[in-house]
Image (spheres, grey):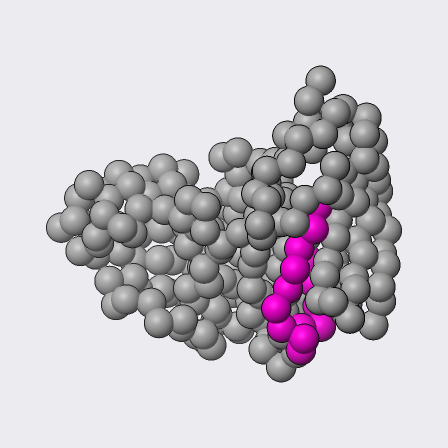
């Protein structure tokens, strides 16, 4: 499944499938990006980050892709599990705007059994 | 656990009450943040403290008053709030007071203003 995080706020995938969550950012001067996961009743939890001098970064079961040409960020989750059900949102930091992260509104990922 | 704790986890207060939210980080970080999270809206940055000095105040109404007595503790004092202030208030910390990096969030305080 694939979702544009800011325009399609929900995404449902079958357990075991790969998930792709997208985020379109607006500021071409942004040079640092983070993906967060927020489960119900909890605060956001860091998943993975990427700086603008990279276009891909991999973690455990997750990969972030950055396309600066079209200002697009995606989070790929391999072999999605029920515990991955949560809201996922991206955040960007604009160069020169120290400490300020601008957050997207998020995508609700639901993993179906 | 992220190393950032918040108390209370839930708070119900009337519009004439005064209450405080507390945040504590056990990570040795130098920057702390308050965010407001309303339903179906992006996180809104309220305040940033770096090395115990307030460095950002994003046009937050004066009925919200932050306090950072030391690098491990952050408070948000509340008075004469409005019903639209009901939201999840999140505290975060980060290691680097100068640049952008990962922020670690607490579990939040769910605030309801009646």
Is residue A47 shown left or right of residue B26?
right
Q: Is residue A24 visible?
A: yes
Is residue A24 shown left or right of residue B36?
right
The image quarter in which residue B74 lies:
bottom left
Seen at 53% across and 52% down, the residue is A105
Quadrant where the N terminus of chain B is found in the figure: top right
Judging depth in this view, the residue of B72 and B99 nearest the camera is: B99
Residue B84 drawn at (x, y percent)? 27, 50
Residue B22 drawn at (x, y percent)? 40, 51
The image quarter in which residue B95 lies:
bottom right
Is residue B26 shown left or right of residue B56?
right
Quadrant where the C terminus of chain B is found in the figure: top left
Residue A88 drawn at (x, y percent)? 63, 45
| Residue A107 drawn above or below residue B65 | above
Q: Which residues are magenta?
A: A21-34
Residue B103 drawn at (x, y percent)? 61, 58
| Residue A53 drawn above or below residue A63 | below
Judging depth in this view, the residue of B34 and B3 nearest the camera is: B34
| Residue B34 drawn above or below residue A5 | below
Q: Is residue B27 visible?
A: no
For the stretch drawn in magenta, the main secondary structure is strand
């Amino acid at each position: 499944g694939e979702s544009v995080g800011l325009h399609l706020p929900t995404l449902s995938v079958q357990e075991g499938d790969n998930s792709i969550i997208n985020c379109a950012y607006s500021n071409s001067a942004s040079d640092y990006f983070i993906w967060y996961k927020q489960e119900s009743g909890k605060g956001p939890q860091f998943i993975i980050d990427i700086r603008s001098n990279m276009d891909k970064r991999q973690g455990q079961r997750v990969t972030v892709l950055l396309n600066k040409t079209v200002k697009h960020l995606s989070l790929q989750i391999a072999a999605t599990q029920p515990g991955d059900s949560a809201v996922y949102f991206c955040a960007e930091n604009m160069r020169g705007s120290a400490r300020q992260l601008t957050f997207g509104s998020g995508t609700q990922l639901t993993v179906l059994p | 656990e992220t190393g950032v704790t918040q108390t209370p986890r839930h708070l119900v207060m009337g519009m004439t009450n005064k209450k405080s939210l507390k945040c504590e980080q056990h990570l040795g970080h130098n920057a702390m943040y308050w965010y407001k999270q309303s339903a179906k809206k992006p996180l809104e940055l309220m305040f940033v403290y770096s090395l115990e000095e307030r460095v950002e105040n994003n046009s937050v109404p004066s009925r919200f008053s932050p306090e950072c007595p030391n690098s491990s503790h952050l408070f948000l004092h509340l008075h004469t709030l409005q019903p639209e202030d009901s939201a999840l208030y999140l505290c975060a910390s980060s290691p680097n007071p100068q640049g952008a990096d990962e922020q670690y969030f607490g579990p939040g305080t769910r605030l309801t203003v009646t």
